[in-house]
Amino acid sequence: MIDFHTHSSASDGALNPKELLERAAREGVTRFALTDHDTINGYLTAKDRVPEGLRLVSGVELSCQWARMGIHVVGLGFDPDAQCLRQHLQLLDAARLDRAARIGDRLESAGMTGALRGAQSVASGAQIGRPHFARWMVMAGHVDSEEAAFKRFLGRGKPGDISVLWPSLEATIAAIKQAGGLSVLAHPLEYKMTATKLRALTVAFAEAGGDAMELINGRPRPGDIAALWRLIEDRQLAVSVGSDFHRDTPYGAGLGVDPSDIPAGRGVWEHL
Ligand code: AMP
Ligand code: MN
Ligand code: MN
Ligand code: MN
């Protein structure tokens, strides 16, 4: 079993890196990457205490933009000490802090006093994101659920949806490549693009030096795999797979993906 897309409490996941790795090993995952949003802090704390039976590769899920849309690129197998990558992560730290302050202002205007400080205390040192605001909003009684927080305040087109100047797709792929890693276009169907737009994104990703596409992210819906294979074949990309695990939920996937249906020679893991 392989899992190349997971989150810990260093970003918006529930388990700390040690707990997450131990659970993955217990559940039969043999190749694993912790891919927190815009931070490798969790990976750095976990990398020297890897449970037996599990091979850890370096990972991160980088926020970037293409055609004014927010896109996620997973980096795998990079040198975590590479200067170019560290600088890139510093840019993202600053972008997320700036965005958090602006989300806080918007929520204050909507009557939610202390939103920024609340979200910061939920994050407690993690890379801050909208899920920390959502959890605080539930705790403070402003909404009944995190889902409702996204629906009413944080999701697309809502007051807390701040457009961010994330680094470009090209700069993101270049930073991963310069650090010796491979780039994976994460959850292509999550962007809700038209088929034409998604094909254009795939071309831009491949031309910028992108290596692989996520064929499986969490629980695929019927038809997802066939649609993604067409894009993968078009550009002869490698394939990556992951659960995108954040926490146990009734609808989300557990850790680990069985890669046995993926033809030999196509898995990104064969290059890591
Ligand atoms: P951010 O990276 O700060 O923009 O936050 C995006 C994260 O929020 C995603 O990685 C998900 O973990 C989470 N998320 C996105 N949409 C929703 C939603 N509708 N309900 C709950 N969590 C969500
Ligand atoms: Mn997330
Ligand atoms: Mn993502
Ligand atoms: Mn993710």
Image: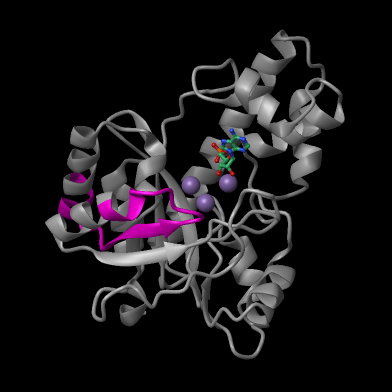
Q: For the point 64% across and 80% down, which residue is it?
A: 25
Q: Would residue 155 appear left or right of 195 to someone viewing this image?
A: right
Locate residue 22: give its quadrant: bottom right
Could you tell me which residue is drawn at 16 percent across and 47 percent down?
Answer: 203
Q: Position of residue 38 (x, y in %)?
A: 52, 51
Q: Position of residue 102 (x, y in %)?
A: 61, 22
Scheme by which the image is coloured: one colour
Classify 128 as above or below 249: above
Question: Residue 264: which quarter of the image?
Answer: bottom left
Q: Is residue 152 left or right of residue 86?
A: right
User: How far across and how far down the image is residue 196, in percent?
Assistant: 18, 34
For residue 162, side relative to residue 101 (left or right): left
The answer to whether residue 68 is magenta is: no
Asked if residue 238 can be seen in this view, the reply is yes
Specify the segment rendered in magenta.
Answer: 204-226
Q: Is residue 254 above or below residue 197?
A: below
Residue 8 image offset from top left, x and y in percent: 66, 59
